[in-house]
Amino acid sequence: MAKEEIEAYKRRQAKRLGFKQVAGNADLLASLPKKEREGMRETLKVRNTRSASGVCVIAVMTRPWPCPGKCAYCPTAKNAPKSYTGFEPAARRARQNNFDAYAQVEDRLRQLEAIGHEPSKCELIIMGGTFNSQPRAYQDAFIKKAYEAFNGKKSRTLAEAIKTNEKAHYRVTGLTLETRPDWCIESEVKRFVGYGATRIELGVQSLDEGVLKRVNRGHGLAAVAEATRYCKDAFLKVCYHVMPGLYATRESDLEMFRQLFGDERFKPGMLKIYPCLVIKGTRVYREWKRGEFKPYSTEEAAEVIAEAKRFVPQYCRIMRVDRDIPTNLIAAGVDKSNLREIARKKAKEKGIVCRCIRCREIGFNRNAKGKPKLARLDYEASGGAEIFLSYENGDALWAFLRLRCNESGECGVRELRVFGEQTPVGAESRRAQHKGYGARLLAEAERIARKDFKAKKLVVLAGVGARPYYRRLGYALRGGYMEKSLSQRQGIH
């Protein structure tokens, strides 16, 4: 039966039996015998977008903790870390689980399986503002508990928990940490790598020095540039959080987006766009009440974001547009939860084609036909050479790899991603994830590093759960990185 037929059948049965609510797909899956459940998993799966990019995202939140910053726009809540209201979905789940990392991960895995997903490859996101402003012992314990939940058992040490996850059923193939640019110094970046981190999200907010000073941000653009370079030189992925409408005009915001990707000090590979919102209890709220501040409306924010898409290059992924804050907590600003769709519609009306990674992923584009071809894009960023390799077919992106060669001559892979719905670890499939694109991209990266940059070795900053994949391709773990000698000639295979 097709999904539409199942939904119609459920409504008829609910009416016939006098039920007030229609049975959810998660309930149907849970009630089926195991053999039938597997056969119906794809049909009854809820929200395919959760795994359409190839991994399942598991977001957990640290305990309520003050932030080193005192920014004018940032909300404060007793039951959530600084910058969160406490009513975001992740914050609610965290509170229900007493902010315990183990309980949050376990609960989320169970939820995803209940709605038909197979979370064997997971991207763990540690939410909580400036994570590394927490005491070091707390950071270590929180990360350890999260890994233990994926492993399904306790470990004596953090190192043991990380090692165990390499062969666990639920593998952490990516770990994201949030922090401020001025807290993202070189020594901290090295420690992040030790945790198994693969991505750092930096609260950049604005590229205007005057705005940063006005909001009492506590740092300037020099800190943003330095943090970005430290992360890229460590072969971490970098995601910026930016805030259109923060003491800005349409013109100045568009200039910010132009500078983001035109200035070699920045050029993030990922972007989260959070228009400034007026939240009660903030300095911005008091200014708004006095008539001294006016945020973007939904239409104004969508207009700016649509125009900003002109400047977003093909190597960047727009991860999110707007925050998960309930509209009843927003005093002024964007008051609709579908800002991304509104901006996309405006862009289409203007003839603007977004080339960001998310808009081209094969997981969201099922109409792509024909064999994808290898493409290469070179650009300079943060004092190094960046090479964006990809398999593409028209507007569809099947796989990509980020290769960086630092000024020191060291070359490393910052990201390797193959799209399509998640295929469980070890499973055979005809989906995009198991067509060999990853191995071919890696072989090409090895060739480029050896031929174009005379590198003697290539390193990969791989998620802990992805390390076995690289071992099969001749890599060995050294100092948190998978490493391979490039002494032998190799090419695309």
Image: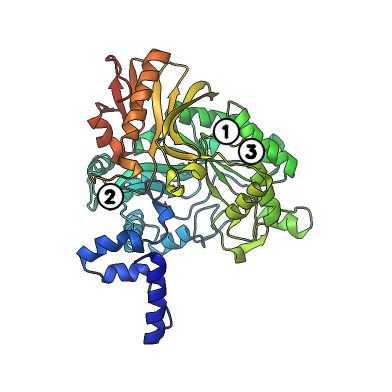
Give the mark nearer the N terminus: 2 vs 1.
2
Q: Mark 2, residues whose alpha carbon is within 10 Å: few (<14), some, or many (≥20)?
A: many
The kind of residue on which mark 2 rests is Tyr
Q: Nearer the viewer, mark 1 or mark 3?
A: 3
Could you give the CA–CA distance between mark 2 and mark 1, rounded to whole angstroms? 34 Å
Q: Residue furthest front?
A: 370
Q: Mark 3, residues whose alpha carbon is within 10 Å: few (<14), some, or many (≥20)?
A: some
Q: Vertically, is 195 above or below 300?
A: above
The answer to which quarter of the image holds residue 100 is bottom left
Give residue 457's position: percent from left, percent from top: 33, 18
Q: Mark 1, residues whose alpha carbon is within 10 Å: few (<14), some, or many (≥20)?
A: many
Q: Vertically, is 113 above or below 57?
A: below
Residue under circle 1?
224
Cβ–Cβ below 8 Å for labels 2 and 3? no
Residue occupying the point 26% across, 61% down: 39
Give the mark nearer the N terminus: 1 vs 3.
1
Residue occupying the point 56% across, 54% down: 323
Q: Nearer the viewer, mark 2 or mark 1?
A: 2
Residue under circle 3?
310
Give residue 379's position: percent from left, percent from top: 53, 24
From the image, which quarter does the C terminus lie in?
A: top left
Residue occupying the point 52% across, 31% down: 228
Q: Nearer the viewer, residue 42 or 89?
A: 42
Could you give the CA–CA distance between mark 1 and mark 3, rounded to whole angstroms? 23 Å
Cβ–Cβ below 8 Å for labels 2 and 1? no
The kind of residue on which mark 3 rests is Arg
Q: Tell me: 150 left or right of 54.
A: left
Which element carries disc 1, helix, strand or loop? helix
